[in-house]
Amino acid sequence: MSENVVHLHKNPDPPTADTATVTTLTVVPPMPTTPPVPAVPLWVRSGRAIKTAVTHERTKEAGRLAVRHSMYVVGGTRVMARRTWDGRTGARYERMLRAAEAAGNYEVAEEWEERLQRFRDARHRRRMDLLHSPVDAAKGVAVGTGMGIGTLVALGIVMAINNGDVADVVTPLAATIDFIALLIRIVQVVWGPALTVGPFLALLALWAVGRKQQAAPNWALPDNVRNGEGEPITPSIVVKALRDLGVPALKNAIKEMGDAGAAMLGPIRIAGCGVEVDVTLPSGVSTVEVQNKRRKLAENLTRHEHEVFITLPEAARTVRLWIADSGALDEPIGPSPLVTDESLTADYAKGRAPWGQDLRGDAALLSLFQRMLLITGLSNQGKTAALRALVLWLALCRSVEFRIADLKGAGDWAMFDGLATVLIQGPTDEHVIEATEMVESGVEEMNRRLQAPPGTVFPLLLLVVDEAQVAFMCPLMDEDKRPYGGSKATSRYFMACRKVHNQGRAVNVLLWQGTQDPTDQNLPKLVREGAHTRASLALGTESQARMALGDKAVDGGAAPHLLRQGLDKGTLVIASDGIDIPAGQSSITVRTHYISTDDAKVIAERAKLLRDGVATVHSIDTGEQRDPLADIFSVLGDASRVRTQDVLKRLAALNEDAYGKWSFLDLKRVLDGTGAEPYKSDGVMVVGRERLARARVERLDDGSASANE
């Protein structure tokens, strides 16, 4: 496309008709313009600027600073006035008297009333003495002046005699007069500046008193004080926290006490990473009312809920508060002595296992002697590690025999291969069956020991079942239609646990269980109440806490349901007579040492060195050189049936290498499925000769048929 060019200069040669062209002009409409922005009024801009300046953080901080230091002076004046008033009147005695009456301590009230009366008598005598004091003061001044002048004149006479000049008689008197004149001139010089500076010094003193007492509104205080960082626990802070707890009777009683509300408090003692104080509640206030307000009390003390523990000591109407330093419970504790001390050994009967530290920072030592144990909690809170730590300590006692069933099967107990005579690892129903038979074999051993001659001492046989809820919830049934799980009288695992709980401790056969998320279905009441030592990690509800520890412990202040899931891993609330619990309390909170799997393997290797060697049974290996069925048949002899324990003894005598380490579990595994399984006769487990003979014949028939094929 061609375009017409319009030249700006004038062409001197006019165009001809041939060269003339027609120029077409195109009118371009003007571009639309943006409407002008209306100007913001000056008053609006000024208001915004003022708002920004007023709400700026620096302005707020400056305002808090000004209010804080001004209120320090006002608060200091109030404090000094109160102190002066208390010193001149009987107000202090009256407050203490009201506090004792409000607390119901009438003996102390009578004592304070007597002190108040003595103070009033002494004040009355002082006031009566003031009636005679002007005359006595005038007489004293006259006598003092006369004696002073006489002394000075006598001194002048001595000087005159010594110097031989009569004028020296008045020299001491003149010197005294000159000295007094000098003092007057000094006062005249200092008086003016003192009048100017004095008020400022007084204000400074009042400011210092107010600052020490933090006599300013909370919002005006520094951030570290306002947020409670590093704030020490003092009697006034505890009293204010109790006053603002929302218990009307407590609030009214503290109001009547005035500042003497601290009379409710015992000494504030340093206890580990916090402090401890006993609070005697006024009449009409229940300890339960304070226990139920734990979160609000913690917030009033500028602490988190998990940093305040409320327990009940022996004294009536008293609560014991343990208040942690801010953030102290989030710091880890040191390693276990099992890890740091390679020379450490264990004594089952007299020793105590180092399990962790209590809230005071003292070592938490647990006696395990003849005590069944139950540990529960939510998943992934450190249950297995806590249970395994106790078993590792016992492993350092060479006389202890372990039979362990890990129904999780994640390798947490694999280091006990070579320490435990039985080690079952896996979560399936088949593993539950094996765990049930393991506990039942413990029952058989218990029965054998109970029938031993009186006075026989037995080494500890420890049955450990981790993730026991898997066993209780197993739906399988045996050939006799008896369920392995459940909590009925026919439930095999449940009944085996009950039998061990009932009589096992008398012959050192103990059952330790670890379970999670307890309910009445996966942790029956009779089983959990059969444990002598009950420990709980973080739980979800108070009802679960009561299942884990019992009503008495929870009513006494135990609160595993208030532990923080995921943050308080390894923190246990323990109810047991095997650990030192402060007098009057029914439980204690312990932060356990964490022993990693690698460290556990090292400790297990040390324990293996204490033993000659333990053959751990995972599955029965009959070998090629022995025929267990034939050997069992041979040791039965002519008897129609023989007790299983006697069969095991005869097998060991027949071949120590092959059968010396056999237990009931091994015997049962060999006979299962043959038709010659052990059965009960007259209350004891036996092996029948006729059944075993029939099983051998059937095996021979099966072998012949296979060969013909």
Image: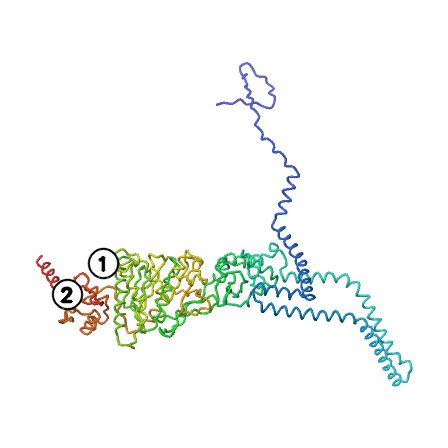
The reply, left or right, for residue 675 in relation to residue 265 is left
Q: Position of residue 640 (x, y in %)?
A: 14, 69
Q: Amino acid at mark 1?
A: Asp
The reply, left or right, for residue 463 in relation to residue 23 is left
Give the class, few, some or many, for how many residues have Cα within 10 Å of label 2's Cα (few <14, many ≥20).
many
Residue sticking out furthest to the right? 166
Q: Name the residue nearer the viewer: 617 or 28.
A: 617
The residue at which mark 1 appears reads as 478
- Which image quarter: residue 631? bottom left
Relative to 140, say whether 193 is above or below.
Answer: above
**Quadrant in the picture for the C terminus:** bottom left
Give the class, few, some or many, for how many residues have Cα within 10 Å of label 1's Cα (few <14, many ≥20).
few
Q: Are marks 2 and 1 in contact (CB under 8 Å)?
A: no
The reply, left or right, for residue 330 in relation to residue 126 is left
Q: Name the residue nearer the viewer: 246 or 518.
A: 246
Q: Position of residue 290 (x, y in %)?
A: 51, 59
- Report the Cα–Cα distance between label 2 and label 1: 20 Å
Q: Amino acid at mark 2?
A: Leu
Q: Residue at the spot x=85%, y=76% of the render?
A: 175
Q: Position of residue 211 (x, y in %)?
A: 64, 61
What is the number of callouts on the image? 2
Of callouts 2 and 1, which one flags the residue occurring earlier in the amino acid sequence? 1
The residue at which mark 2 appears reads as 692
Relative to 148, say whether 11 is above or below.
Answer: above
Disc 1, SS: loop
Check residue 210 in the rendering and tell me which mark sits there, or answer none. none
Q: Residue at the spot x=87%, y=78% of the render?
A: 171
Q: Position of residue 74 (x, y in %)?
A: 68, 58
Residue sticking out furthest to the left? 708
Q: Residue at the spot x=84%, y=80% of the render?
A: 151
